[in-house]
Image: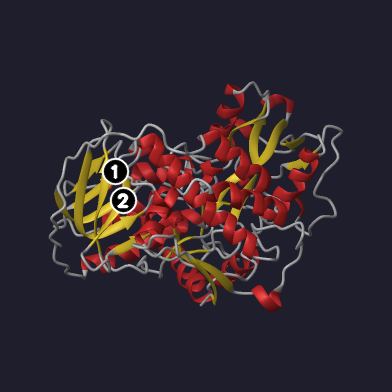
Amino acid sequence: MTKDDVIIIGSGIAALQLATQLNNQLNVRILTKGKLRTANSYLAQGGIAAAIGTNDHPSKHTVDTLEAGRFHNDQEVVREIINAAPTLIRNMSLEGDVFDKNPNGELFLGMEGAHSEKRIVHGGGDATGKNMMEHLITKLQANVIIEEDVFAYELILNSDQTTCIGVKAKQADDTIKSFYGSHIIIASGGCGQLFTYTSNAETVCGDGIAMAYLAGAEIVDMEFIQFHPTLLYVNGETKGLISEAVRGEGAILITDDETPIMTGIHPMKDLAPRHVVSQRIYEFLRNGKQVYLDIRNIKDFTKRFPSITTICVENGIRIEDGKIPVAPGSHFLMGGIKTDLIGRSSIRGLYAIGEAACTGLHGANRLASNSLLEGLYQGEQLSKWINGTRAAHQESKISDSLQPAISKHLNLPDRQLIQETMMERVGIVRNKEDLKKQQTWLTQFNADKIPLDHCSVHDLSRIFMVITASLITESALQRTESRGGHFRSDYPVENDQHWLRRSIIHKYNRGMEKNHEFIKTALAT
């Protein structure tokens, strides 16, 4: 058993931003399911958005964010984070050679979908996440301990179940170790691996959200899943992300006969909001027609997009032909653990930041390159809160270093089947019949009733996938409209009268014989 001031579950941008800005007198421990450099943030290509251009202003960035989010956003949160963006970017730029600059030494600004101005800051061309992560890693001090290959699986609450005081985790040999701390932060990312096609890292399965749910924290807006329009698509499989910045530089979406597919669909054509472009590509694929990104108008493509070039070459795509086959895939979760701007959840002592959290910034559909921005902002704000807060360590009588027998015959579906059924029934286009079918299928596994201590890491991952998939499915079933990343073919339009700025909240009541989950509709503040 260990005791720390701060325990961070996850190792992406939000987690490292927090860790680097905490007082160096605090004992900080980062627990990561995989390796430090396998987080989703490390894979981020496109960039980070900030209104720093000559003709730009945070008010324009705010309008774009609200429009992309279909006005489901928390407007106060949007203004706070967007107004802070220029300072966050400039501060990091001053700390090191993180972002790309033009010949005049000014930050190079690119364009992405649904933005009204060039405001996307890049690093290493299309390796922005990697550049930012490496920069933050160099800033980590001796008070930060990193534990890799540690699977956090259960939050520890105090005796009256009101305060989070720690987390249990399994190590590679299935030994259980308990970590106690004054502040427990979930920064484990979203749940992209619930779907067959995704841009997400292998480890991103919704673990943190499921843990928080089982502990009794409020979970919100889980129906809003963003499908990125352009993943490299080879032999029926997605092989990696083709950044939105490629379309920002002039690439267009075409069919085999070179028909542009976005003409007449949206005023912004190929740079329309992601849900519009994803649904359009999906229609063609469903009818057996391949869609390509035509990159022939982009000069020096291999220099501008070195990471994407490498991905294509490794998968047998000839860049010189100028056509990259693409398909949409799960990319980002707008919902998650309900928090305030600082990251405080509905449970005392438990926080969430980054994609695992839902602050209200993104609304129903995240504006491109606002995710890294949110991670930087939340990491900084939570560090200020913790640095100014004194919290006593909680005592506990829970024993440590347990190694119980592992259950061998759990009634759980395999990972691939979860992905296939979610993609088919709860993917880009949804309807009541498929959602009810998926709800019934997921309910039979009673994943929330399984004692976790006796499960292997493999089984724990499947349990959390089923729980998170259930939250998404039930939310998608209840929201009888289409908005942002949530599209219902049986309710194909927005219903502002009933659903504008209304959220679906899940809460699990611990200690009951049955799962008394309630879903309530409440005004999003």
Q: Nearer the viewer, mark 1 or mark 2?
A: 1
Res 130 visible? no
Q: Viewer-proximal residue, 426 or 55?
A: 426
Instruction: Count neighbours of disc 2 (C-alpha within 10 A) and say few if under 14, some if 14 to 19, many if 20 or more.
Output: many
Residue 158 image position (x, y, % from top left): 21, 63
The kind of secondary structure element at disc 1 is loop
Q: Is residue 418 left or right of residue 189?
A: right
Residue 165 image position (x, y, % from top left): 22, 60
* Circles 1 and 2: CB atoms closer than 8 Å: yes
Decide: is 326 above or below 135: above
Q: Give the residue at mark 1.
A: 453
Q: Residue at x 31, y 34 (%)?
A: 406
Q: Which mark is residue 154?
A: 2
* Amino acid on which disc 1 is placed: Asp
* Amino acid on which disc 2 is placed: Glu
Decide: is 19 above or below 414: below
